[in-house]
Structure formats: structure tokens, C-alpha cells
Image (cartoon, grey):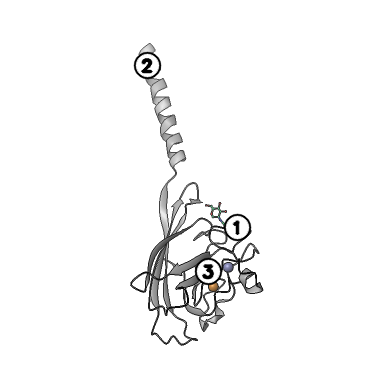
């Protein structure tokens, strides 16, 4: 009799732990996307074509529907040098290539903020203000970036939006001129692509 009760108790405790443990861990996977950067068809790049690939990944917990930090692996070749070899990188509103990268519209800004830098809080930056890429010693870009704010999916997700690489350094909103607060004064659109889920 006592043995049976102990057995029942142990079984109850174990099944509680199993259910509770699963709920705490959640089921997790990754959501991934890619973007194939190409030279802006409406600008001429004297140094030849720009090509690049940005692969995005973000952990997503299926039962909790929480997203982790956004990771981006960015590779770009063929960038022309500029004054300090910094190039602004942002998510723009659309990925409409009808007029090259020009028809991608302004920075994707669902929260109505001013332009900023990646470490700024959500009311001080746009969703895809990823700051600057820098050329490495080989003259290209191969970096892994993380972003604490942007999500691939869900409300205000960046999939199907446009990614733009600019001709100049993004001043991260600190330049003190009107263009700082909209574009970081980062100049022409050198290359762009659509962020597509993979
Ligand atoms: C990103 O997704 C998480 C849910 O996982 C949400 O809490 C957060 O508000 C989202 N971020 C933005 C900027 O929408
Ligand atoms: Cu931009
Ligand atoms: Zn911006």
C-alpha cells in the first residue's frame, strides 16, 4: 500500500517535471533569409560590378514565439574605395527594383523614429539601421554582424524588404544636418537586394 503511494507520487513528480521542463525550454529552430547584393542598375560604378551575399539567421522558439538576436553574415566584393572605406548599410521600405535601388524608398521606419546607429534604442533609430561596413585589407567585406532590434519575422519583420549599401559613411544620426536624421548622410545607393526567406 505504502509502496504503491510512493510509486504514484514519484510518477506524478516526474511527469510534472517533464511537462514543466519542456515548457521552459520551448521548441527552438532558426528562421533564415538571404539577400544577393548587386550593383545599383541606375548608377555607374567605374571599378566594376559589386556583388555580395548577406545571410540572416535568427533563433525562434516555436512554442514561445520569441526571437533571438539577429545574426548577419555579410560578404561584399567590388566596392569602390571611398574617403574612409566605410559604407552605410540599411533596410529600406521596399525591394521594388523598377527604378533600380532608387525605388526602394526611405529607410524602413514602422516606429516613426529618426535615423540612428545600431546601438541606439528603438526610438532613436530605424529598424534596419545597421551602421557601416568597412573594407578589410583585401579590399572587400567579410563580417558577421548582430543586431539587437530587427526581427526577420513577425510584426515589423524585415523579410521582403530592401537592403541598401551606400557610397559613404553613415554618420549614425550625429552629423548635425537634416540628412543625418533621415539617411545618416550616407550618399548614393551603390548596391541593393531583396531580403528573402530561405
Ligand atoms: C521582435 O520580436 C520579439 C518577439 O520575439 C518582440 O518581443 C519584439 O518586440 C520584436 N521587435 C520589434 C522591434 O518589433
Ligand atoms: Cu540606406
Ligand atoms: Zn535609418
Q: Is mark 3 within 8 Å of ligand 2?
A: yes
Towards the viewer: 48 or 31: 48
Q: Is residue 112 left or right of residue 154?
A: right
Q: Secondary structure at mark 3?
A: strand
Beta carbon at label 2 within 8 Å of ligand 1? no
In contact (CB < 8 Å): disc 3 and disc 1 = no
Q: Note whether residue 1 is visible.
A: no
At numbered mark 2, what does the secondary structure look like: helix, strand or loop?
A: helix
Give the SS element for disc 1.
loop
Could you tell which of marks 2 and 3 lies nearer the N-terminus?
2
Residue appearing at x 60%, y 57% in the figure: 122
Respond yes or no on whether mark 1 lies under 8 Å from ligand 1. yes
Among the two numbered marks 2 and 1 on one chain, the one whose residue lies closer to the N terminus: 2
Crowding at label 2, few (<14), some or many (≥20) Cα neighbours within 10 Å? Answer: few
Ligand 1, image quadrant it occupies? bottom right
Q: Seen from this angle, which residue lies furthest left?
A: 138
The mark found on residue 91 in the picture is 3
Q: Position of residue 2 (x, y in %)?
A: 38, 12
Number of marks drawn: 3
Which mark is drawn over residue 122? 1
Residue 23: x, y in percent? 46, 39
Using the image, tell me which numbered label, if any, was put on residue 69.
none
Circle 1 crowding by C-alpha within 10 Å: few under 14, some 14–19, many from 20: some
Q: Does residue 135 appear in the picture of this structure?
A: yes
Relative vertical location of residue 1 with respect to residue 141 in this rendering, above or below? above
Quadrant (top left/top right/bottom left/bottom right) for the N terminus:
top left
Residue sitting farthest toward the top = 1
Residue at the disc numbered 2:
4
Residue at image location 39% in from the left, 71% down from the top: 53
Amino acid at each position: 500500500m505504502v509502496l504503491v503511494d510512493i510509486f504514484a507520487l514519484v510518477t506524478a513528480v516526474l511527469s510534472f517535471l517533464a511537462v514543466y521542463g519542456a515548457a521552459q525550454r520551448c521548441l527552438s529552430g532558426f528562421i533564415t533569409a538571404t539577400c544577393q547584393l548587386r550593383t545599383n542598375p541606375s548608377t555607374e560604378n567605374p571599378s566594376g560590378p559589386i556583388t555580395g551575399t548577406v545571410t540572416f539567421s535568427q533563433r525562434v522558439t516555436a512554442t514561445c514565439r520569441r526571437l533571438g538576436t539577429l545574426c548577419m553574415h555579410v560578404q561584399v566584393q567590388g566596392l569602390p574605395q571611398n574617403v574612409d572605406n566605410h559604407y552605410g548599410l540599411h533596410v529600406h521600405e521596399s525591394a521594388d527594383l523598377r527604378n533600380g535601388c532608387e525605388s526602394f524608398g526611405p529607410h524602413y521606419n514602422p516606429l516613426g523614429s529618426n535615423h540612428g546607429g545600431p546601438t541606439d534604442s528603438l526610438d532613436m533609430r530605424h529598424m534596419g539601421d545597421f551602421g557601416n561596413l568597412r573594407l578589410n585589407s583585401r579590399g572587400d567585406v567579410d563580417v558577421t554582424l548582430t543586431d539587437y532590434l530587427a526581427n526577420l519575422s513577425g510584426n515589423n519583420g524585415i523579410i521582403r524588404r530592401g537592403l541598401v549599401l551606400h557610397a559613404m559613411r553613415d554618420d549614425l544620426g550625429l552629423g548635425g544636418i537634416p540628412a543625418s536624421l533621415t539617411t545618416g548622410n550616407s550618399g548614393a545607393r551603390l548596391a541593393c537586394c531583396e531580403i528573402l526567406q530561405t
